[in-house]
Image (spheres, rainbow, N blue to C red):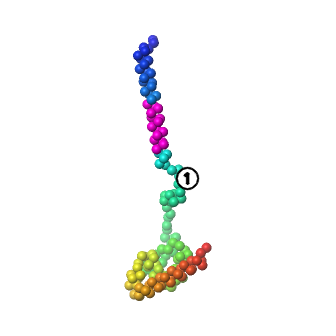
Amino acid sequence: MNPSSFQTTIENQFDYLCKRGMEDERIDYFRHLSRISKQEVSFSDTGDYLINQFSTVDHYATDLQMFTLYGLRIGVESDLLSEALRNLTNKKRNIILLYYFLDMSDSEIATLLKVNRSTVYRHRTSGLAFIKKYMKEHAE
């Protein structure tokens, strides 16, 4: 049996609509891929700064040099800095630890140690000068 011309026309229209639908889907998919590729960056193309934001470094208490000051334990990560601090007098070391590690002001340190604020300032600046000199001499 031969199909009628009307039936052939309907089949051809259906065939065209199916092919057109698949073509439109293909075009939409490639547009979607194009939009995504404009937003994505290859991992190998990212800079070290961005990669370092995704990394973590574990810190352990055993990696720190510990100083005990007024019942508080202060950890210093740098071995060279901790060695320089150990070579300071107790008063200068305590002032530097209080100022830089416990964020105390000269006035607060002076009240705690029962000395003048200018004495705290003098010990702190001379201690820092010693540390700077020591670290320059012993830097690897």
Q: Residue furthest right?
A: 140
Q: Residue at x 52, y 77 (%)?
A: 82
Determine the image quadrant of residue 98: bottom left
- Vertical placement of 4 versus 112: above or below? above
Task: State the extent of the magenta-drawn residues as a range.
Answer: 21-35
- Image x and y of residue 56, in percent: 49, 61
Determine the image quadrant of residue 118: bottom left
- Image x and y of residue 115, in percent: 41, 88
Q: Residue furthest top?
A: 1
Say if the magenta span includes residue 27. yes
Mark 1 residue crowding within 10 angstroms, few (<14) / some (14–19) / many (20+): few
Quadrant housing the C terminus? bottom right
Which residue is disc 1 drawn over?
44
Q: Residue at x 45, y 82 (%)?
A: 95
Q: Main secondary structure of the magenta part?
A: helix
Quadrant housing the N terminus? top left
Amino acid type of the residue that numbered disc 1 sits on in the rendered structure:
Ser
